[in-house]
Image (cartoon, grey):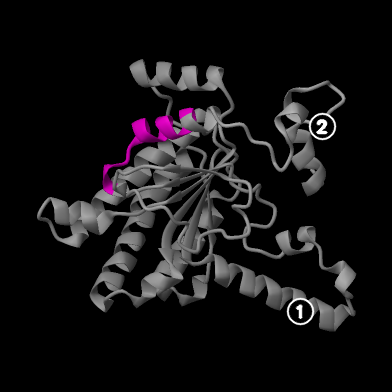
Amino acid sequence: MGKGPQLATGEDARVQEKLRTSGEIPGHIAVIMDGNGRWAKKRGLPRTAGHSEGVESVRDTVEACGQLGVRYLTLYAFSTENWKRPKEEVSLLMRLLLKALRDETDRLHTNNVRIQAIGDIDALPRELQNELLEGIQRTKDNTGLTLILALSYSGRWDLTHAMRRIAREVVEHGLTEDHITEEMISSHISTAGIPDPDLLIRTSGEFRISNFLLWQLAYTEIYITPRFWPGFRRDELYEAIRDYQKRERRFGMVSEQLHGSQTEVGAGRFMKSLTGQ
């Protein structure tokens, strides 16, 4: 029997089918998971409770995305700036990430989810690195949802390392300034080969992107919810997708080009021409 996502049932299955028939399902969703500490404080709980409940939100979101047919889900799990937090909280987060990988990899593999990671993985504790790499290796041939964990990641880190790799190629291969194109930069960032996000979800009501996927978010639709991440479940994911389906994605063009004659290039073909797909 082939692997695949656990199917939705009952009312949830009906909601998912309506989403599929009412518009486009985003191919790539990125999420800034914010508000764990504030969720816990509001309830008189330690911050650890917020982080633990946030794992439940991850589980539900990953499952729903797999059921809907989302191809890529990128979660901002730990930023380079998060290393500045109190040592006790950082240690807790590392242990929680390790436990989540150990507890969830079997389920992800059974549901045909492929695990990938972006960021300065070498900065993570060795035990966490090993668990992460084992999960990536074990699920590498899965063909369903690709779950991308952004760990010790920031957009500026990503661009800095891309520039360093390009600089090495300039030195080693004598490249000129004409070789430096958008396509070349895209091929050297950590998400090379992965489509840019169609939809960015930010929880906790903050209106900023917090140094996340700075290059990749150029044409991404943004959805802000006041819910803290531990309270985020698939119902809010569905609402974000409904909102996305109402947007007109013009990619620099005008509405008349999108809705005009058949000779005009549509947004999907336009983007494919840019990426060479």
Residue 233 sits inside the magenta stretch: yes
Q: Which mark is residue 265?
A: 2
Q: What residue sits 55% from the left and 57% below the top? A: 137
What separation in Å lies between label 1 and label 2 (alpha carbons)? 35 Å
Residue 51 visible in the displayed image: no
Side of 234 relative to 270 (left or right): left
Could you tell me which quadrant the C terminus lies in? top right
Horizontal and vertical percent position of residue 240: 44, 34
Q: Is residue 50 left or right of residue 30?
A: left
Side of 239 relative to 73 (left or right):
left
Q: Quadrant of residue 161?
A: bottom right
**Marks 1 and 2 close (CB-CB < 8 Å):** no
Instruction: Between label 1 and label 2, give the one nearer the viewer.
Output: 2
Q: Which segment is the magenta one?
A: 230-242
Q: Under tag 2, what secondary structure?
A: loop
Rendered view: 184 above or below 231: below
Residue 30 in the image, given as x and y percentages of width and height: 50, 48
The earlier-in-sequence mark between 1 and 2 is: 1
Q: Does 243 appear above or below 81?
A: above
The residue at the point 35 percent across, 62 percent down is: 98
| Residue 231 spot, x, y in % from top left | 27, 42
Disc count in the image?
A: 2
Disc marking residue 167: 1
